[in-house]
Every structure is written in C-alpha cells, then in structure tokens.
Amino acid sequence: MSKVTIIGATGNVGGYAAHAISANPHVHEILLYGREGREPLLRGIVQDLADSFAARGTDIAINWTTDLKETDGSDIFVITAGIPRKPGQDRLDLARENARVIGPVAQTIGAVSPKAKILIVTNPVDVMTCVALRCSGMAPNQVFGLGTHLDSMRLKSLIAGYFHVHVSEVHTRIIGEHGESMVPLWSATTIGGIKISNLPEFSHLPVQEFIQSVKCSGEEIIRNKGSTVYGPGEAIASLVKTVLGDENRILTVSAHVKREVHEMPGDVCIGVPARMNRDGVFPISIRIDESEIVAFRESVEKIRSITQKVFDDFNK
C-alpha cells in the first residue's frame, strides 16, 4: 500500500486529483500539502474529501500539512503548484516564475524522500519536469511530467468519434512539447489493430482541425468555465495507478530522453512513449516517419532553448 502526496492541493486540479486518486486500490493514504496561511482551506478540503470517502465506502486516510518535511515516506509526489499562465504571457516568463516554485520543492523532496517518484503537472510541464529532475538530484526514471498524456487521450477521443468506434479500439500518441509544437504520430495510430492510413476514410479525416482542437482544448475550457479540472485530474490518477500498480503500461509522458526517438539527440524532458511501473518511467526506443522527425526535432530544440534560459536565470 502506498502514500501519495499532492503539492498544491488547494488548487482546483490538485483537489480533484486527490478525489480521483482515492479510487486507487494501491493507495492507503493521501497527504495534501499547501503553503502556510492556507490551513483553513486545507482543513476544509480534507473534511469534504473524508465525507466523500464515507459516502463511497472508501477506507483511505486523508491528511494535510504545511510542512514539506512531514511528507516523508511518500511513494509518489504529484506537483500541481504554480502560477497559471496570464493572458499575453509567453512560456519563458511563465517557466521562470514557476521554476522558482518547483525548484525548492523538488530539492526538499529529494532530501526527504529520495526513493519516491515525482509527477509534475505544473506548466510549462516539460521545462518544469527538467527543473524538478535537476533540483531533486533524483534519477531520471524517478521524475516525469503529465506531458502529452492528456493530449493523446483528447486526440484518441476525436478519432474514435470520427470512425464511430469505442475509444479502446483507438491507439494513438502525441509526442513532443505539451504546447504548440506537439507532434501527432499518425504513423503509430491504429484502429482495431489496423494502421489508420490503411483505412479509406482516413483520406477525409480533418487532421489539422483535430490537432488544432487538441492544442486549444485547455484554453477553450478555461475560457468557458475558468479552469481545467476533470480531464487533468483523471489523467493524473491514471498515471499514479500505472506506477503504483506496477502495470508496465506504455503511456506518453514528459520524461528525460537521450536518443530513444529515432536516435535523435535529446537530453531534455519532453513527451515520449515510456514504460511505467513501480521503478519509475523508462522511455522506449521508437522510429517515426520523416515528417514527424522534422517536427519532433523542432519541438526538442524549442524545449531545450527555454530550459537553458531558465537555468541560466537560476545560475544568476
């Protein structure tokens, strides 16, 4: 049985992620962490969640703290803390601001729970995953980000709707940045085990419309209801379950890559297919089509550039 700590639990995503994770049979305790001054809110969230557990019949401990040292013994940390992107703010400015939040937290986690796993949700998630990896001092397999996991699920849903099939029949992936330079792997997309390009209907698929929909999905939800909650929360819970359940599933998350994607130089944290289990996250070696190679290389260079600027700022 495992202990999960959520950093940033007073936010919408952190709070709902706690509820979604509570359905995991491998978890015996959820600890909510928030900064000092948020004690009444943390207490209220814990009370509300405890009531939901009672109504559901879930036997799981739920606690809160404002002291990171009390998170020792955690098997996995989910970090949702950070500043949301403001209108007109570029990703580099956002990265610099959130790195000041993620860096110290990751450093403390590395000292208090060096054998734990860290799941980064804070945006820009690829850059923040690298910040957490370096500042925690942990091994690359211990630190990963939500990355393009939810993006891949969004594309999967759109394809299933177009072909009128159950979502379980669709296998597809988006790699690269969780952002504008994301790369859909049509070469690795299948429906019922059949390569999508071998289906006559594929020639009419509104490819660009689908990709644009995936890219704008979060922004549209925020515009309509203020924040994305349920999608990210369930995506977080599925990754936690995959790791703690030792499932060895291959999911697309932000992970540190070397030359796993078509032997291209990496040394960044970015969305790639990875095998996930109790030991952590392990990117798998893949080969992709020529057009996808070009797009992925551009995505890698974009993330590398932003990451380097963030660390240059750190060093100063």
Image (spheres, grey):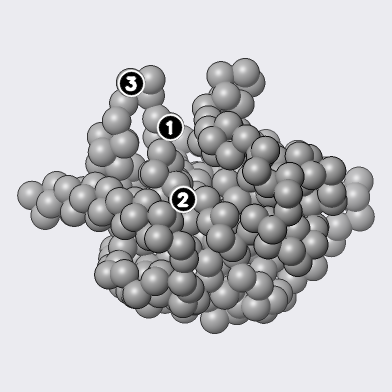
> Looking at the picture, how far across and down is residue 309, in whole percent?
17, 48
Report x, y in % for residue 310. 21, 48
Mark 3 — residue?
A: 88
Which of the labelled discs sits on residue 229, or is there none? Answer: none
Task: Name which residue type carries label 1.
Answer: Pro
Q: Nearer the viewer, residue 313 or 283?
A: 283
Is 272 positioned to the left or the right of 129 in the image?
A: right
Where disc 3 sits, the SS reads loop
Q: Nearer the viewer, residue 270 or 2?
A: 270
Mark 2 is surrounded, within 10 Å at the Cα level, by few (under 14), some (14 to 19) or many (20 or more) other residues, namely many
Query: With respect to residue 132, does 287 lie above or below?
Result: below
Relative to 139, is 50 on the left or the right? right
Asked if disc 2 and disc 3 are in contact, CB closer than 8 Å, the reply is: no
- Mark identifier at residue 84: 1
- Residue visible at 12% across and 51% down in the picture: 312
| Residue 13 figure quarter | top right
Residue visible at 61% across and 26% down? Answer: 221
Of mark 2 and mark 1, the one earlier in the sequence is: 1
Q: Residue 143 in the image: state x and y as whole percent.
A: 44, 67
Mark closer to the observer (2, 1) = 2
Residue 113 position, x and y percent, is 45, 72
Q: In the figure, residue 28 lies in which quadrant?
A: bottom right
CA gap, disc 1 to disc 3? 12 Å
For label 2, the SS is strand
Numbered mark located on residue 183 in the image? 2
Please count the marks in the image.
3
Residue at image x 54%, y 81%?
Answer: 279
How many neighbours does mark 1 have within 10 angstroms: few (below 14), some (14-19), or many (20 or more)?
some
Q: Residue at x 40, y 34 (%)?
A: 83
Classify 10 Å Cα crowding around label 3: few (below 14), some (14-19), many (20 and above): few
> 213 or 179: nearer the eye?
213
| Amino acid at dot 3 | Gly
